[in-house]
Image: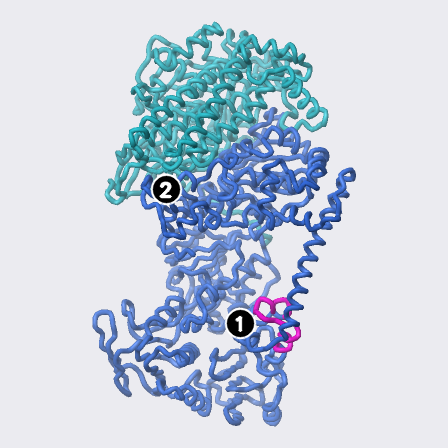
Chain colours: A blue, B cyan
Amino acid sequence: MRIVIVGGGVSAVYLANAILQKEPACEVVIVSDESHPPYDRIHLCALVDKSQCVESITLDLNPKVRLELNQTILRIDVSAKRIFSEHAVFSYDKLIIATGSTPKTLFDIQGITNASTFRSERDSDKIAQGIVGKNVVIVGVGPIGLELLDTLMRSPFPKSITLLARKDYLYSQDLSREGVAQLREIFEHDPRIRIWFNDEIVDKRIQEDRITEIQTRHGVIGDPFLIFGVGIDPHITFARDVLECDKGILVNETMRTSDSDIYCVGEAAQLRTSGFIAGRVKECTLQADVAISNMLGLPSKSFTQEVSIDGLKVGSFLFADVTSPTYDPKDTDNETILISHENRIDHYIVNHDLLKRFIGINTNIDLIRLKQLMEINEKIDAAYLYSNRLKSGKGRLVCSCESVYEEELIEIIKLNAVTSFAELKPYSNAGRVCGRCKQDVCSLIAATPVDAAEAARLRSKREDDAKEADLARVRARIEKYNAIHPKNQLSAENLEEAMASFDMSREFNKWVSMITATMHLHPDFEEVVKEGVTKLNKIPIIWLELADCSGNSEGFIKSSHPKIDDLILKYISLDYHELLMAGSGEQSESVLDNIIKYDSGKYVLIVEGAVPLGLDGKFLRIGVKGETGHALLQRVAKNAAAVIAVGSCAYDGGVVAAAPNPTGAVGVAEALGRADIINLPGCPVNPINIVGTLLHFMMFEEFPKLDAKNRPEWAYGFRVHDNCERRGHFDLGEFVLEWGDEGAKKGWCLFQMGCKGPYAQMNCSQVKFNEGTSWPVQVGHGCFACGSGKIAFDQYANHRPLPKENNE
Amino acid sequence: MSNRKIVIDPVTRIEGHLRIEVEVNEENVVTEAWASGQLFRGIEIILKGRDPRDIGLIAQRICGVCTNVHYRASISAVEDAYSITIPHNAEIIRNLVTLALFVQDHIIHYYHLHSLDFVDITSALEADCAKAVKIAQQYHENPYHNSQGHLESVKEKLGSFVKAGRLGLFANGYWGHETYRLTPEENLVHMNHYLEALRIQHDISKAIAIFAGKTPHPQNLVVGGVTSVADMLNPQRLNDFMFIIKEVREFLERAYIPDIKMVVKAYGESIALGEGRGSGNFLCCGGYRLGNNEQLFAGGVITGHDFDAIEPFDPAKITEEASRSWYENNPPSSPYDQESIPFYTDLNEDGTLKSEGKYSWIKAPRYEGKVMEVGPVARMIVGVVKKSKVIKPYMDRFMSDTRMTLIDFSTSIGRNAARAVEAQICCDYLFDFMSNLIENIKYYDETTWTKYVFEELATTARGEGIFEVPRGVLSHFVRIEEAKVANYQVVAPTTWNASPKDATGQRGPYEEALIGIKLSDPSRPLEVLRVVHSFDPCLACAVHVIDTKGRELSRYKLSTVCAV
């Protein structure tokens, strides 16, 4: 199933990761109108003060997800199940809209250089560049405006900052007057900052593309930089024609829209019954879970609002907000309880003795406890609240998703001598769920001193454990080898050597020389392994050609070490291969049937070519009975010991699935709906990678370590660009600029001629082709990342650099 | 009426997905035949709407066996549309790669895809090696790798392979079939060269990679020329290329040609009976300019085996139709104007072809309405008839050695003979092309690319790239509108040879060649394979369609693989 997600934020990423976790066989595509991979908007402030760069706030995305950037969706064709951007069309089986919202402005700021909204990385960048020496004006007092104000307060660059409040409150109408006063005091402590209440822009002067002056009720601000934080509208214009909408896209409690194959979550979705529109990360992820369950047909869930824990992400004070979903701000029975002490304010809103909302400034109250109180609807009394103000040895709540308190976290940090966010992972998930508190957690780790000696000891213990696990793996392999090859016992004495020879990702060159020298392993192993392989491991191999061009077969027979004649006579038993086998028709069919029957669970299936699913698979038929390629694949794959998809077509459809994918072609893994297919993409795959993978299987009866796309790490763990012979010229800025020019004669870098080596995860630059004779970069053409699958044929197979690419 | 149908699917030892059905009478003689392409991919549809400069890398993927020629033809079609003439050096480098591919392709075809139709490997195990050495010497004074010790080791290698019990690729072959004609010793000589040929084709691929980066799917062409300028200027690379070709030439002279002569002799009866003879219409476009402005291949059209009358080739006379193919019916028209919408009428319930209806993804190209055979045999016959200075001397020598006449080449065995002679010609002329290249470089011509400014080129244009390629005439047609590919059409050699019947009932060349073939054992139809393989089928190339109106091929729904 192909699921397309429109949107480029937290919800989109959460959806994509969760879908693949539940159904690894799904094809998930994220279509985003941004030029960066999805990042966490919560940390946009960090981009303004440059404490982070966009890469560091980029969200972790399952690498199986296909990411389409710079694609603004313009319309949906619900009958054909396709969405259209200006340049591309995406078909879907299920569509999820998670486009979030667009920020409002009070007047059109298109083309104006010193005005901005605050919603995207582009905005952050514009603000960071634009505020230097300017009189910054922030319009809007919601969380966005206040967090930005807090960030700018700590920046030396703005000349002055004016916050315009349309009414007389900050944050929310519910914030107490004391609270407003306190915030004002904190902010205006900085002499550059002033907050003007009951104010708004009444006029402005614009010269060319700059606002030169802003006039408000209170005064005139010259040489300004204007930032709108006045609110948001669901970003759904492209869907209005085809889906029922109000403010947002209307959804039922399963997050389904008026079209049964389209779901919508997050700020773009409006619940049909309650009119609720989510605004917090937690609500978005809850909605995402609901949408996924219903879409994939898992146990049904429906979305109900939960108690939310939120606050302001500010550095100058603590600010927490807990709100019950049943809170109605207009209810006249709401009562306020305010307990303040020095710079601390605990503000409770209670309705008939039930707690409805809490807003705390510099509070250390147990927010989780308050949340529980709201959830169980337990009546409370004021005395309880009062006595609680002193409480909480656990400190403030740091991570509301994981319910981790400050003191607990410090304890964890100390106990385990954690010195970085990464090291924290085995002990606590704090900061890793919605990501909002990640910076807090990092600061805590930085601020918590740990015993250096203890930290070092623990670190080395962790390394030892990892090494021990590696050794255990090697020992297990040797035991297995010895069990399979009783005559050819491997010695377990020099395990270090064994590990070095076995672990291909670490000892790549050794592995290559092993292949090139017909599997001459480390001298200690040479004889036994050779014997073992030749005598005992003639595994039956079935090689199916589906929607292909035979390029991988042609490549395979050009294998160098071992050469193809040795390979087919000595090492493998290539029992079925249409290009080479003697028998045809009934004769070849009976060979196939016999292997499936008598070698069930033992044969390795190699598949070349895409699987056309269009026309019920009838674009390809094989055999006397006219079986479709898809049916044949399913039949043969069922009892195979392993399935290896060779070439880019078998990987994800490759060139056959390039737009507009006329035959509905997919890769082997998708056609079989299996997550255990080994992929060896390339167009064609380098035979070294097939032979190496087979030899590994023959020696150890298991396949080499695979990456997230199921490709052997020893072959695909490298970027073409990093190992390119022309890399030195890239670093020196020496580029070929025209075919056959002087640079071309000197072998300069082909990046400007559209070489896609920087985007190619393959070992071509190391092993080359045709017995190391050459490769596309060596002949001056450049790489087009042919092993990336169909994307290579839609985006990389040309002689122009990718648009707007910031390569390293 | 006891005619019955025999279905052969998959036809193995070819590129692609081919089905052959034949109808035989009580005497097991073929009375009717159907050749059907069973895979549709629609590469031309994928090409539509793309930047004309980019299509080479995609068109190339039409086939991984004839891999370089589609790359070249598509880029040449765009160059033709824009009237870009490529530098002489670029043309030579393209020729070096293309002709090396001819040699490689012919060797692989004969030994690895076809020879098992003539060679019984089980019989080779009974060979007397000393005798085999002598027998090989009847066909060449110094046969390739033919010492007694070497043959012993080949026999031993095969013997231990067979003894080990898993026959792999050789399982369930037609071993012991009564139409095998070679002696055990002759079989051993062939098997020896089967294994040697595996190494030789591997070595040629290294030569190709020197200028093309890799093979299959080389990567050295761009609109306007070639990119491998640094390799061209590196004397070591030129030398490496020639050294490999020299070794290949040894193999051709001392193995391939003698082995073919051996088969011609052993299967003399088959030639005399005219087994595999078709309608006798041959088509060549000619091409590959030599230094003296001769063409390597002569062009021309012969009909009905009339070797006294030869017409010049005119691409405008090519039409295509689809009355028996899985596309909507249209009157025959030029490839530029083809409009074909897939119309799949399925197979019968039992999986057989609908003999009276549509039955193949391959369309029916015709020349002046006639079925045409293309390929080495067409080129060699046309070359002799036109008294080509290049081809005729080689053919004369071969014919005098084997006492074959021109009509004898129009048979299954004859096609193989023509192919072997052609491999030798291509290999020898690689040296000519290389010395021309060295001459150019000697006089400081280092140009490999013709400069153009894409934005200044015509936004509407049409062009064609028509080449002789290993299996016959290949034509790519491109129409450009608004600087994008508006229409793309390929007529490949196998489209001609494997074509289905047409509205007037004319059989395609494979089908025609099968009529009258007698099967000794219908359950093991080796005779049919012998005929079909002699054409060197390449199905991935053959299936082509274009829909000029950009309509969707069919409504399809991606299958739901997730559990729902």
Counting from the top left corner in percent of width and height, residue A348 is at: 53, 88
Q: Are marks 1 and 2 in contact (CB under 8 Å)?
A: no
- Disc number at residue A438? 1
Q: What x and y, as percent, mark residue A465?
A: 69, 61
Which is more toward the observer, A225 or A513? A513
Picture coordinates of residue B513, whole percent (x, y) = 48, 16
Q: Position of residue A804 (x, y in %)?
A: 36, 56
Which quarter of the picture shows residue B152? top right
Q: Nearer the viewer, mark 1 or mark 2?
A: 2
Q: Nearer the viewer, residue B60 or A337?
A: B60
Asked if the stretch drawn in magenta spans residue A378, the answer is: no
Mark 1 Cα shell of 10 Å, populated few (<14), some (14-19), many (≥20): some
Vertical side of A157 occupied by A195: above or below:
below
Highlighted magenta segment, given as a residue range: A409-427
Residue A415 covered by magenta stretch = yes
Which type of secondary structure does the marked residue at label 2 adopt? helix
Point out the image quarter for the C terminus of chain B: bottom right
Q: Amino acid at mark 1?
A: Lys
Outermost residue to the right: A486
Q: Chain of mark 2?
A: A
- Residue B523 can be seen in this image: no
Please report whichever mark, 1 or 2, sits nearer to the chain's N-terminal start: 1
Residue identified by numbered label 2: A746
User: What residue is at 37 percent from the left and 66 percent from the top?
Assistant: A122
- Element type where label 1 sits in the image: helix
Above or below, comparing residue A687 to residue A87 in the picture: above
Badge 2 crowding class, 10 Å Cα cut-off, few under 14, some 14 to 19, many 20 or more, is some
Name the amino acid type tagged 2: Lys
Residue at mark 1 to residue at mark 2: CA–CA distance: 49 Å
The quadrant of the image that shows the N terminus of chain B is top right
Residue B247 vertical position relative to residue A98 in the rendered view, above or below: above
